[in-house]
Image (cartoon, coloured by chain):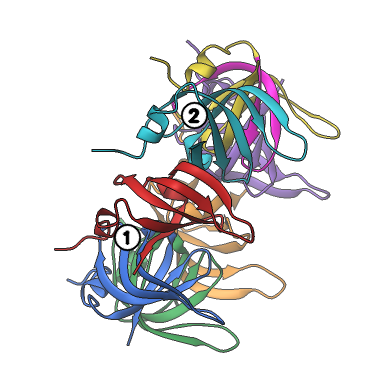
Chain colours: A orange, B purple, C yellow, D cyan, E red, F blue, G green
């Protein structure tokens, strides 16, 4: 039986993109997540015309629309 | 007795469209869901003038307006 | 003793209109609902200048403003 | 000891106005309510330059700003 | 030990102003409140260039920014 | 072990500023707070080009972005 | 087993940036946090064309999009 959060379980230490409700795309390496879908990324940056480097970041689950590890 | 989430139960491994609160339509193959209506799609893309490929994606339930498997 | 959700209980297999918080009116045949007011419609379409056919759809309760079976 | 929901308890089968968070005023006859302030109205219509008749309607409590039976 | 809701407890049957999240100021006489900060006002009106009389009104707690009995 | 709400515990009877989600800054003397971060201020006013005096005010916790006692 | 909130645990007494849902960046020294991700910062200021000094501040968890200690 698969569950949606398995998407995250199989992406640990891989690069993912997080889309936030305020319309930003944050890219980084997934280090940890919890049942609220709070996300810890390393080497994160906000994508845009000129990217903004964040480094380590904790993203609150309830600010997130979707999360994608790509293929 | 039918329940609303049966719409998802009968759509596993089928193509569905997810409408998010920020106005995007994400199309992909349903792999898993849970009681919060968190959704795991494969081969997902955001529909628009030019589609954006996401591949595998986890969509948070509370960001979703509706989900449709079509006919 | 009547309860608000009786409006839905008496509308099963009838045509209803669902108004969502993002301002769309979705019309379809009510198949099932639950205590969160998640709604399963069949033969659904989004009303507008040109209607958009959805077919079967699951609408999340917390995206809904009101639901009306008409008379 | 009075409680706020007594406003609804004393308004059953009377005409009330419901103000929703998306800025609409819905007028109708109160048939039932619950602790979430979900509301069932009969003979409801959305007030505006030209009123829109809804007939029977279930309004979700968390979409409501205020409810008034008038005097 | 004082608690924030004591502001309401000491304002029963007095005139208060309620600021809602949609930017309206509703003035009226406080009759009752509960732990969700649902508010029952009598003789209420919405302040503005031309006030709108509501009479008796139930305001949902989660639509409220602040409540003030003035001095 | 310090906790975030200690910021409020050490500010009782002192002047604080409360930033609300609708963009207003409310300044006043903190009288009480609870675990929901509901706030009771005395001698409160809304800051702006011309300040608006509120006197005593109860601010709902879920309307608040941040609270600062300054230095 | 790492958890997302470890990002905060390892940042106590260090400078972090907090991005709020209303689009402000607040920079300060992390003193404490809790499971709701309520945050206590010292020496905080709101970044912008001209920074606004806040000093000590309590930021409500549900107003936060992300938190970053940088590298």
Q: Position of residue D8 (x, y in %)?
A: 42, 31
**Which chain is disc 1 placed on?**
F
**Extreme-left residue of the structure:** E1
User: What is the x, y in percent for residue A7?
Assistant: 50, 44
Q: Residues within 10 Å of mark 2 (few under 14, many from 20)?
A: many
Taking the image as shown, residue C41 lies to the left or right of residue G37, namely right
Q: Is residue A59 visible?
A: no
The label shown at residue D39 is: 2
Q: Is residue F10 above or below residue A40?
A: below
Secondary structure of the residue carrying tag 1 is loop
Mark 1 and mark 2 residues within 8 Å of each other at the beta carbon: no
Residue D59 occupies which quadrant of the picture?
top right
State the SS at label 2: strand
Is the stretch drawn in magenta largely helix, strand or loop?
strand
> What residue range appears in magenta?
C15-35
Residue F29 drawn above or below residue B59: below
Q: Is residue B49 magenta?
A: no
């Amino acid at each position: 039986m698969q569950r949606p959060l398995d998407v995250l379980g199989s992406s640990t230490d891989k690069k993912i993109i997080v889309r936030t409700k305020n319309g930003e795309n944050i890219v980084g390496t997934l280090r940890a997540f919890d049942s609220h879908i709070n996300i810890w990324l390393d080497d994160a940056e906000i994508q845009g015309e000129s990217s903004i480097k964040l480094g380590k970041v904790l993203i609150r689950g309830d600010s997130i629309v979707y999360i994608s590890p790509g293929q």
